[in-house]
Amino acid sequence: MHQPAHTPKLALRLLTVEAMRRVDAAAIDAGTPGFALMGRAGAAVAERVLALGAERILILCGPGNNGGDGFVAARLLMEAGRAVELQLLGDRSALTGDAALAAAEWTAPTSPAKTPLPECDLIVDALFGAGLSRDLDGAARALVEAVNASGRPVLAVDVPSGLDGDTGQVRGAAVKAHETVTFVALKPGHLLQPGRSLCGAITLADIGTGPAALADGLAGAPSLFRNAPGLWTLPILSAASHKYTRGHALVLSGPAYKTGAARLAARGALRVGAGLVTVASPNSALPENAAQLTAIMLRPCETADDLDDLLVDDRLNALLLGPGLGTGPATCEFVAVAAAAGRALVLDADALTSFRSEVRTLARHIRDGEAQAVLTPHEGEFARLFSGTDAVAEGLAKPERAARAARLAGSVVVLKGADTVVAAPDGRIAINDHGSPHLGTAGSGDVLGGLICGLLAQGLAPFEAACAAVWLHGDAGLRHGPGLIAEDIPDLMPAVLRDLS
């Protein structure tokens, strides 16, 4: 889905299934008939089908309002001269409400949905919407499996049938669509995996519910956002800006032969705009780091006491610990000292694993030092750190796991993956869909940690810094494409940042 460079914050809100129901209800209460909303939804589907140029169209309708949208689209497409076959899953006499009204306006034959599917150029999947309440089985599952096996392109209405709109999970079986047309706002399931991969290209249609109804639907709903510019604003330089006003990031290095991760992170922090960056290095690794650092400064640091001495300089306002640092008590001591200093703090990799099953101890360090912390675990690190807590309870969707983790840790949590989720302790959650599988390469996560640290050094709040860094990191991956290695990511930042200015 195309994403403007700066999207208004309200437009980035994601609607849960329940919030979407409230939006529809508020629009109807305000005087827009539900049948009018269905008519606009069906028209949006028909418009997209016509744009695709298909001539022979199979429309599969289900027993609810999603099927009603399909009936409207079928009528409009037939009026536009397309060859349309409509198949209904269930009994037409069982249709109720607006779906029954839409079916009454369809005067051509209606066939029962069955396999094998007839020949066509395009299948419109209007079987089930985002609010599917149970796993598909029986005839419904067989039909979904036949759609996937047909080899025909599929346009899904709202979400691919079988996809949970809130979690992005598959309910028994789900259609794999080439495109999806949805309405009013995206749902979490459009962005969370595997839902994102099943939706294909997404068209978001305005069906006239209006801003007041949207506000009613969002009242009391989870603070869910799509991650994009507009959710955050990057630091702006003035004529009076200089390196000391842009912050000083400190990255701890691992021992000799394990220094690369820290240097990658440090370069990310520098390229994203931190005025100064220092790598704090064990004596054994000083020559190794010195041989490869130029604009990035280098200081010796063997122990937690050494770090404490370094932090007497309060210009060191953002710290990154973890990449290549090693696991164990020594790393825990480094983290305790960093947290006690009350600076902005990014913890990744070994700094997280060192607190395996001890997230409450980590949270206490962060709370007692009043540090502004961002934790950046991948799934394995997340499972280790939050083991034994309700953040790893079975069956939770990724946003809820991240939200529980953020509350437990008293920190922003960046739960990394193809559908990275950023959660703040205050309940804000952002889901990122701006990225590339080419970012799945050694050292990529270290650069991400450095980007967050560099933005924190410049004064961004933790949630905004984390969201911005995730998006910038993803944009670099999209720009480079195949052949990307971690060293490329910092050097792509000037172009990424220039296009946002």
Image: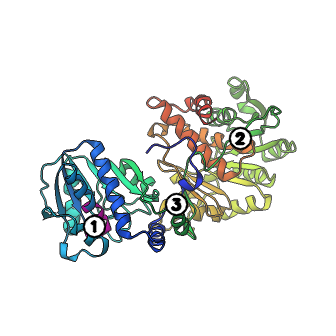
Q: CA distance from mark 2 to mark 1?
A: 48 Å
Do callouts 2 and 1 mark residues in contact (Cβ within 8 Å)?
Answer: no
The answer to whether residue 428 is magenta is no
Residue at which label 2 appears: 235
Magenta-drawn segment? 63-71
Residue 145 appears left or right of 32: left
What's the image's color scheme? rainbow
Residue type highlighted by circle 2: Pro
- Kindly indicate whether the residue at mark 2 contacts the one at mark 3 (C-beta within 8 angstroms): no
Please give the name of the residue rendered at 70% of the width and 35% of the height, measured from the top-left corner: 273
Q: Earlier in the sequence, mark 2 or mark 1?
A: 1
Residue 324, image quadrant: top right
Residue 295 drawn at (x, y percent)? 73, 26
Residue located beneath label 3 in the image: 399
User: Which residue is more in the foreground, 18 or 333?
Assistant: 18
SS assignment at label 2: loop
Residue holding disc 1 = 136
Helix, strand or loop at disc 1? loop
Where's residue 360, x and y in %?
67, 65
